[in-house]
Image (spheres, rainbow, N blue to C red):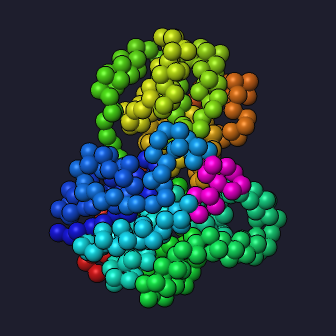
Amino acid sequence: MARILITCFGSLGDLYPYLALGNGLQQRGHAVIVATSPIHGPRVATAGLGFVPLRSALDRYVTPQAASGFIEQIFEPRRGAQRLIREMMSDFAQTCEDTRAAVAGCDLAISHPLTYATPIVCREMGRKWLSTALAPMAFMSSFEPPYLSAAPFLDKLYRISPALFRVTFGLAKQWSRTMVRAVYEQCRLRGIAPPSANPLFEGQFSPYGTLAMFPEHFAARQPDWPVRTMTTGFAIHTHGAADPQARERLDNFLAGGEPPLVFALGSSAVEIAQDFFPVAIRIARQLRQRAVLVAGSRADQLAAMTADPALQVVDYVAYDALFAHASLIVHQGGIGTLAQAARSGRPMLIVPFGFDQFDNAQRMVRLGAAQRMRRQDFSAEHAAPIIAAMLDDPALARTAAAAGKRLTEQDGVAGACDAIEARLAG
């Protein structure tokens, strides 16, 4: 039996794949500790895994108002990612200290793309570690470049000249080193060599191996991926609803009529939804469709506004309990939400808000399981006709079901556990 540490930061879409992985490792007899933001501690404990708080600058955004304001800032298309990284760097020494204490008693560490301290500490302490990529965008391949909201011109440049794109992209990556000076400073203080590659890009990946935690059918391996990359499939965390009474009301609604439209925005974009859910209500009424809205903190307000038996508004529900009952799913394209939607086999309309969501959406469009709509175009006027056409398209329903089956036939938890145990065995 090994003692395995998982370090991660981010939203529930970031946390849940690691909880699934931790449960899988635990079932194989390993002891698993998850080091993450203190706010996630109760969810880690509910999953039956060990928890260690991993302090960072993110801890200051714990109230709903502070979290909403911060999420709005980091989802800003041009400079949001820079704001997130610089915020992570502001208390980086503290994060390194917590990581060092957590790594000390473990045989192997597994890092999330945002846990920049884990590679440093593992190199300092001589520990083996595996890096992970939850979505293909983490690899930032110059052979299959993702859409970057901070630099949309790069998408056009790649189509014009891949060679010129690689030069421009390389210069941008070189400049980005200025955002992670704290990483180099910690290496100097700890007496270890600085990363040979940019910590935001190639430097985040472990020489021992990287787990690409999505299906091979979702993203083909590219020449510039790390050499020891193992594609495992989606690691999907299944869990019950937080409120049994809310779950019972939802189950009764689902059983009481035709499959509904589902509108959901994960755990981050839902905090900056703005008019998304009022538009969703107008769409459902215009199309005379039943609908479920997973609206987070706005659920009570929306429920009071609608008072419509054809609409069910919930603050939170486990997607595995809902998506399989949908006629069509409208979501933001976060990798956790997308994995659950793919498993349901239902058609999707994806409205990306930021980060990897644009790239994830485009991949589902290429697979024929989804359509994509810009956030600024999501209105009843524009979206209702598209959704109506999708509902009336039996070919789309068949393609979405086939794509979902293929995307989820690979057992992501088992694949990741096999790769981890292979590394433990040397």
Quadrant location of the C terminus? bottom left
| Residue furthest right in the image | 160
Q: Quadrant of the N terminus?
A: bottom left
Q: Residue at x 44, y 57 (%)?
A: 9
Residue 194 horizontal/vertical position (percent): 52, 85
Camera-nearest residue between 121 and 198: 121
Q: Quadrant of residue 282?
A: top right
**Can the viewer see residue 124 in this picture?**
yes
Instruction: Find residue 235 and report its horizontal and vertical position in percent.
Output: 38, 53
User: Is residue 179 depicted above or below 193 in this figure?
Assistant: above
Magenta stretch prevailing secondary structure: helix
Location of residue 246 with respect to 396 vertically, above or below: above
Q: In this view, does 286 lie above or below 14?
A: above
Residue 154 among magenta residues: no
Q: Is residue 83 magenta?
A: yes
Q: Give the range drawn in magenta.
A: 73-86
Instruction: Return the x and y of residue 181 as percentages of the image width and height.
Output: 58, 75
**363 or 90, nearer to the observer:** 90
Instruction: Tell me which residue sits at (31%, 22%) in the image.
Output: 245
Q: In this view, does 139 lie to the left or right of 39?
A: right
**Relative horizontal placement of residue 60, taking residue 275 as reference (left or right):** left
Task: Say left or right for 99 vs 300.
Answer: left
Coordinates of residue 195 in the picture (x, y in percent): 52, 82
Residue 385 appears in the rendering: no
Q: Quadrant of residue 86?
A: bottom right
Q: Residue at x 33, y 43 (%)?
A: 238
- Name the residue rendered at 24%, 57% in the picture: 50
